[in-house]
Image (cartoon, rainbow, N blue to C red):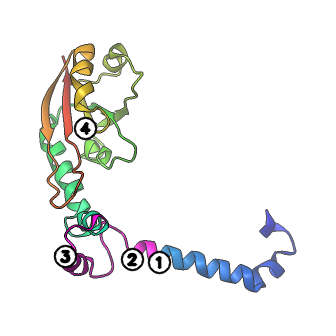
Amino acid sequence: MLLIRPIQSLVVRHAEWQRLGLVTMGFTIALVIASGDRPLFPAQTIFSALRENFPQNEFISEECGRYVDGGYRNSQARRDYLLTALPASEKTVGYFPYKFDVDEPGLWLPFGRRSVVCILPEDSPAYLRAQGIKYLVTYGKALPEEHLSTWLKEYNATVVGQFTFQTPGLKNPNKDLYLIRLN
């Protein structure tokens, strides 16, 4: 609203406004350079050397998991798993997410042939079946192992596939990705 008034030309010429614009651009550049999937600096070289010199440092260990061991490679491996594990004939797949999961795009593959229904904890088994869902994918953190068996009984379902994340060097490794079939 500030910029649509006639006074906007004075505002954008003000030194503080211009500095704010430059700081914003600087933060954006820093985020792009430090992107975990494809960093624009020699991340593998730097963090591999740091991990050798400081093997007990948790911060370095976590960053090595992000840059060296490759979160992108793990995401791609999960997508490849989902592409082969899910029957190609399934047109609707349920997805029980955990916060910021990156696995949902892998469920759409090949793009345009499948729809994905986000499953919430309060959704009933009847709702899932009414949606035409026969297969469900969930992340181990979304449905921890201590709750998994109870959930499977309640929904009359079985685990038909499981992907285990292989992330060396991480203190708290990621949980599994489960492929569940509703009976």
Depth check, front residue: 181 or 27: 27
* In this view, the mark in front (4 or 3): 3
**Which residue position is annotated with label 4?**
140
**Which residue position is annotated with label 1?**
29
Q: Are marks 2 and 1 in contact (CB under 8 Å)?
A: yes
Going by the numbered disc 4, the residue's amino acid type is: Gly
Residue appearing at x 21%, y 69% in the figure: 68
Nearest to N terminus: mark 4 or mark 1 = 1
Please indicate whether residue 4 sits to the left or right of residue 121 in the image: right
Nearest to N terminus: mark 2 or mark 4 = 2
Please indicate whether residue 19 sits to the left or right of residue 66 in the image: right
Q: In the picture shown, does residue 165 fall above or below 181?
A: below
Marks 4/1: CA–CA distance = 34 Å
- Which residue range is magenta in the image? 29-58
The part of the image, by quadrant, that contains residue 69 is bottom left
Going by the numbered disc 3, the residue's amino acid type is: Ser
**Which residue position is annotated with label 3?**
48
Q: Tag 1's secondary structure? A: helix
Residue appearing at x 41%, y 73% in the figure: 32
Q: In the picture shown, does residue 64 fall above or below 172?
A: below
Going by the numbered disc 1, the residue's amino acid type is: Ile
Q: In the picture shown, does residue 115 fall above or below 126?
A: below
What is the x, y in percent for residue 31? 44, 72
Q: Quadrant of the N terminus?
A: bottom right
Q: Are marks 2 and 3 in contact (CB under 8 Å)?
A: no
